[in-house]
Image (cartoon, rainbow, N blue to C red):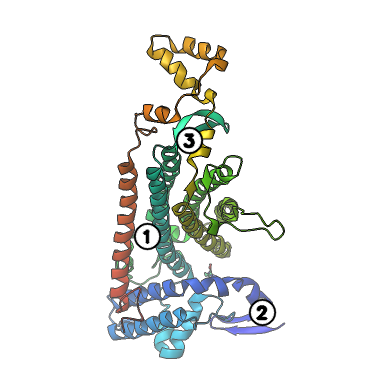
């Protein structure tokens, strides 16, 4: 049996490879969060009211300086996590010990990798989710802009995909915008759940040290500590599931927008023109311009749904306290965040240069599209609605092609083709953008203070 020496004992080579798994790669994105979390922990250790401090104030500062060094190394792609390290946590502890000797060996006092990985993921998720809010606001803006530019351009509204009633491009575009804004309400709830600090819960049962968990949470810019130490451990995976479920909602909206665009840009409809630079050709058919980007967004929605389901499946019926199963929630979590961000960004780019063909949209209007409007004209002349409905149904062949532009103008009530309030969309999107800005500046201010360098710049500050 081949053994490998690690800083937490000797482990069989195969077992080490199997248990470290993909952490040695996945954890690369957690290096910064791990350093920030560790900085808050050493500050808390140094601040503890004990007769003999575990770490003096200047020792904490020395550790933090090394942590900043690790952040810089990681940004240059020079910080290694080896299989022997198992994960980012032990890689950082190894480096601190190599550089600071006994001082490095003290940093893990009163902490477990369980609360450490939980805090890392929450710090990482905070920034990633704020990025998603921002990307989503940008797409909402593009959809609103497109809808406003073509606010009164008539479009056939469909039910069952069959021609139904007159509507407008403005209504079509902002329907997707409003869906995204609602998805962000769910994401905001998940963000708030994520915004609580698990540090100090250690392995899930606390430690016999007077750790000031409020101070730790505060140093890291979290709204609060998670109160119960065991819940802090059990919440791993659950918090990820909350975020992923919100992301799944966003991706559902994107998949439907993508499908509408695929459909309405095919030559048989020709309502919309996809920007050429967002289409790809065929290796055999010279004429092809395919909507690959939209098809991939449609498929990636299934990926994010699967990521949410993978995490939920892993934590379902999991016994309380840490179980190594939780490590497997990391990959779908990181993947779901990145897939959603990338999908939002490419969709914003696509909508920003989306074209439209007024004539093709107009050609969609056949006389039956005006059937309901005609029945309501009869209602206005005094006929009960059901009689008007039956009359029109029995005389469908007599329906004239009315003017779609007039039909669009006639719907003046809230949210209809002539009653869209673009200020409503601007207002809700603006609130999202202000939220992102305020949260980021609050978080960056805390981390800058904690690390003693301007964050996230780091390099420039020195
Ligand atoms: N890499 C591990 C994970 O992601 C860190 C926690 C390990 N904790 C443990 N008790 N083995 O879950």
Is ligand 1 less than 8 Å from the beta carbon at label 2? Answer: no
Is ligand 1 less than 8 Å from the beta carbon at label 3? Answer: no
Quick one: label 3 or label 1, which is nearer the N terminus?
3
Rendered image quadrant of residue 208: bottom left
Using the numbered discs, state the Cα–Cα distance from disc 2 to disc 3 in whole angstroms.
Answer: 66 Å
Quick one: label 2 or label 3, which is nearer the N terminus?
2
Q: Which of the two discs, 2 and 1, sits closer to the camera?
A: 1
Quick one: label 2 or label 1, which is nearer the N terminus?
2
**Horizontal and vertical percent position of residue 404:** 45, 29
Q: Residues within 10 Å of mark 1 (few under 14, many from 20)?
A: many
Dot 2 and dot 1 residues touching (CB under 8 Å):
no
Mark 2 falls on what kind of element? strand
> Residue 222, relative to residue 406: is it above or below?
below
Q: Which one is nearer the viewer's eye here, 321 or 349? A: 349
Using the numbered discs, state the Cα–Cα distance from disc 3 to disc 1 in whole angstroms.
Answer: 47 Å
Labelled disc at residue 12:
2
Residue picked out by circle 1: 196
Judge whether residue 223 can be spotted in this image: no
Residue picked out by circle 3: 155
**Horizontal and vertical percent position of residue 201:** 41, 65
Q: Which one is nearer the viewer's eye here, 345 or 359? A: 359
Among all residues in the image, which is located at the extreme front?
A: 359
**Horizontal and vertical percent position of residue 409:** 37, 30
Mark 1 falls on what kind of element? strand
Using the numbered discs, state the Cα–Cα distance from disc 2 to disc 1 in whole angstroms.
Answer: 37 Å
Residue 362 placement, left or right of 51: right
């Amino acid at each position: 049996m081949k053994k490998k020496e690690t800083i937490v004992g000797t482990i069989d080579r195969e077992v080490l490879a199997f248990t470290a798994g993909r952490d040695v790669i996945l954890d690369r994105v957690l290096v910064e969060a791990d350093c920030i979390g560790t900085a808050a922990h050493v500050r808390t250790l140094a601040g503890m009211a004990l007769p003999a401090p575990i770490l003096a104030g200047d020792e904490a500062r020395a550790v933090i300086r090394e942590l900043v060094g690790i952040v810089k190394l990681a940004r240059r792609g020079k910080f290694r996590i080896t299989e022997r390290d198992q994960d980012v946590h032990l890689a950082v502890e190894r480096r601190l010990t190599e550089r600071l000797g006994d001082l490095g060996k003290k940093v893990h006092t009163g902490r477990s990798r369980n609360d450490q990985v939980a805090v890392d993921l929450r710090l990482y998720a905070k920034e990633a989710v704020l990025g998603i809010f921002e990307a989503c606001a940008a797409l909402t803006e593009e959809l609103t802009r497109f809808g406003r530019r073509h606010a009164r351009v008539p479009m056939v509204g469909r039910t069952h995909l069959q021609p139904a009633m007159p509507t407008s491009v403005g209504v079509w575009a902002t329907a997707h915008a409003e869906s995204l804004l609602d998805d962000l309400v769910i994401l905001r709830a998940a963000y708030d759940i994520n915004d609580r600090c698990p540090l100090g819960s250690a392995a899930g049962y606390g430690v016999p040290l007077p750790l000031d968990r409020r101070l730790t949470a505060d140093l890291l810019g979290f709204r609060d500590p998670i109160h119960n130490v065991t819940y802090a451990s059990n919440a791993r995976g659950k918090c990820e599931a909350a975020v992923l479920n919100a992301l799944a909602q966003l991706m559902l909206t994107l998949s439907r927008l993508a499908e509408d665009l695929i459909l309405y840009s095919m030559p048989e409809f020709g309502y919309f023109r996809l920007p050429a630079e967002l289409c790809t050709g065929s290796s055999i058919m010279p004429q092809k311009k395919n909507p690959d980007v939209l098809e991939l967004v449609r498929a990636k929605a299934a990926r994010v749904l699967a990521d949410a389901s993978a995490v939920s499946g892993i934590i379902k019926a999991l016994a309380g306290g840490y179980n190594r199963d939780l490590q497997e929630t990391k990959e779908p979590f990181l993947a779901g965040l990145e897939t959603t961000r990338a999908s939002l960004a490419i969709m914003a780019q696509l909508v920003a240069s989306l074209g439209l063909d007024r004539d093709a949209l107009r050609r969609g209007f056949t006389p039956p599209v005006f059937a309901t409007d005609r029945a309501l004209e009869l209602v206005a002349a005094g006929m009960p609605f059901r009689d008007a409905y039956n009359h029109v149904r029995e005389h469908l062949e007599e329906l004239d092609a009315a003017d779609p532009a007039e039909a669009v103008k006639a719907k003046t009530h809230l949210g209809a083709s002539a009653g869209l309030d673009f200020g409503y969309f601007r207002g809700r999107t603006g609130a999202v953008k202000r939220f992102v800005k305020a949260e980021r500046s609050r978080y960056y201010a805390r981390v800058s203070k904690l690390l003693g360098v301007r964050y996230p710049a780091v390099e420039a500050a020195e």
